[in-house]
Image: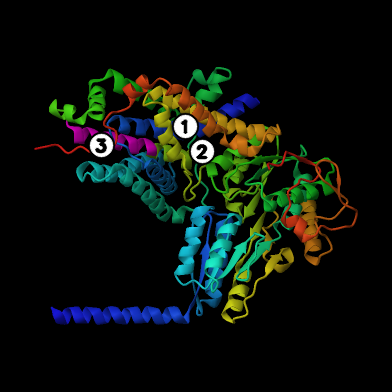
Amino acid sequence: MGIVEAILLSVITAATPLVLAAIGELVTERSGVLNLGVEGMMIMGAVSAFAITQITGSPVLGMLAGVLCGALFSQLFAFLTLTLVANQVATGLALTLLGIGVSGMMGESFLGIQGIKLQPIAIPFLADIPMLGPLLFRQDIIFYLSIALVAGVHWFLFRSRAGLKLRAVGDSHASAHALGVNVIRTRYLAVMFGGACAGLAGAQLSLVYTPQWVENMSAGRGWIALALVVFSSWRPWRVVAGGYLFGAVSISQLHAQAFGLGIPSQFLSSLPYLATIVVLILISHNRRTTLINTPASLGKPFVPDR
Amino acid sequence: MKKLLLALASTAAAIGFATGASAQEKAKICFVYVGSKTDGGWTQAHDIGRQALEKQLGDKVETQFLENVPEGPDAERAIERLARSGCGLIFTTSFGFMDATIKIAQKFPDVKFEHATGYKTAPNVATYNSRFYEGRYIQGQIAAKMSQKGVAGYIASFPIPEVVMGINSFVIGARSVNPDFKIKVVWANTWFDPGKEADAAKALVDQGVDILTQHTDTTAPMQVAAERGIKAFGQASDMIAAGPNTQLTAIVDTWGAYYVKRTQAFLDGKWETTSSWDGLKDGILTMAPYTNMPDDVKKMAEETEAKIKSGELKPFTGPLKKQDGSEWLAAGVSSDDGTLLGMNFYVEGVDDQLPK
């Protein structure tokens, strides 16, 4: 295995949870809901995936548990903000804090236990392509899902009727409501999708990235995912670009250090963030295209008049 | 109704009285943790120390702790909250809490503070530390014996004297066995981020090191080492569970005895400002069992450990050169503690530029 291949493999592992959590949040935000609880849903996904894997011995069941737990946990946020019309920013932050606390409690008995890794699945024929095969076609199912989800979300948002409705709800909930779209139900589903994706991202952490459970193991990745949604200007494929750019710079800086290039490590450590900011400035250079993509009702509460 | 209210009020008063009385009897000893008390590493070691204190002096003291307290401005609030809530003695257990501890200590002259691994004291602030570097010297020697490539990877957290001292001691130990031994250093710039620590470990292994050692807090690097089939050292706690066939040994922090000693002094009214820096011989630092190595390496490690305990061997003893080749210590001269505690340079053999 060459060094380039090794670096790319690490990049894929590092970027996958970011892409997953971001693509979920992208759908949530496209429906006009700002859920800052990504970190909390992610860590809940991580702990339940690990716990169910330990109990059943099957990482696939664990993964499903992570997805389910993320989706369920997000419904708490949905109920508070959509039905009870609580402030989305405050509720999202509370969801993160609650998630970190509850996951710590749930995970207490699973500390220090050796994890079971979700095994890679080689795709016949494709896996034998030199270079690309081992990188892209000998991965675990969560990686395949992350790419499929991005493609699916792209198709859903821009090619399907339901996606058009979801975007309408995010852009002008009053108009969508007037046209007979059920705004609240659409948003409930969008939040649930966001939660499921964040839960899957969490499962990737505790089953693939570092197969173990430690409290607070998401270590801020939910926040990076949130930033990636803005970075992508709410376009699905740009989430992949952003996630992999961030991952690539994070991993390369570690290699640059190990190689002994003599560049200050504090500078190298801040590179992923700097690179993201630079690209963000370049992308948002054109204000008009940015505005077109920003969901106009983002974060605004909707109360249907009866 | 009135009667009921009166009854409620008097019960409440009685309860209030009861807790007030018991709080007066028991001294409150408090801890501030940088990570989670179950991190499997640094903070867990402190929490085990706290539990030992509860066990031994539980009839006289009650303990309280705040975990996941970030270094920086938040630390001040956390420490102040404990000081206000009636803690008599507060242990702040991370280097980055130093300035916050000193600042709050000035505000609460009647509360005693103990700061781990720092170098600033005050009339009511003592410092305590452990000579972790003694363990790292032994690890260096083992690494030099066990590595086939003669290169070890070192995952470091922040460029503070404590960490630099550890890197140097490891290299000096390794070079006492193999004078050509080299290490590669990666700064993770975090104490606690399993993903990032694993990434750093992978980067080092991909670049050809065959022994890993870490100065960060989770078992993620140990797990990567196990997966890649190389050997590694645990940090702060025994990490053998994460790598049954991987861990060579670990530096295990055993703070309990110190916490009991200092709390006893506090209870007796004999507490005073000290700068305690104990090591292997005092039992504040122990080595996890030497595993996954041939008997001759094990024997060497045990001999070195015994020599350090008896004082016969001091890791930082000349002839030693700094990284740039200039003389640091002449033959037979040992470094003073002040230089070690403010260490801001590498010794010869470190293949890295020290972040400044």
Percent across and percent down for residue A139 are 50, 29
Question: Where does label 3 land, which residue?
Answer: A300
The magenta stretch spans which residues? A182-198
Q: Which residue is drawn at 49% across and 54% down?
A: B74
Residue A169: tell me if it is visible. Answer: yes
Q: Mark 1: which secondary structure? A: helix
Q: Please report, as a chain letter, where disc 1 is located.
A: A
Tell whether label 1 touches label 2 (CB within 8 Å): yes
- Mark earlier in primary sequence (1, 3): 1
Residue type of the residue flagged with mark 2: Tyr
Q: Please report, as a chain letter, where disc 3 is located.
A: A
Question: Where does label 2 land, which residue?
Answer: A209
Percent across and percent down for residue B295 are 77, 53
**Main SS of residues in magenta:** helix
Q: Mark 3: which secondary structure? A: loop
Q: Which residue is drawn at 57% across and 27% down?
A: A8
Residues at discs 3 and 2 both on one chain: yes
Residue B255 included in the magenta stretch of the image = no
Tell whether label 2 touches label 3 (CB within 8 Å): no
- Mark earlier in primary sequence (3, 2): 2
- Mark earlier in primary sequence (2, 1): 1
State the residue in front, B293 or B107: B107
Query: CA separation, marks 3 and 2?
Result: 36 Å
Query: Which dot, 3 or 2, sits closer to the camera?
Result: 3
Question: Please, is residue A248 above or below residue B314 in the view?
Answer: above
User: How many marks on residues?
Assistant: 3
Extreme residue toward the right, this view:
B331
Question: Where does label 1 land, which residue?
Answer: A16
Residue type of the residue flagged with mark 1: Thr
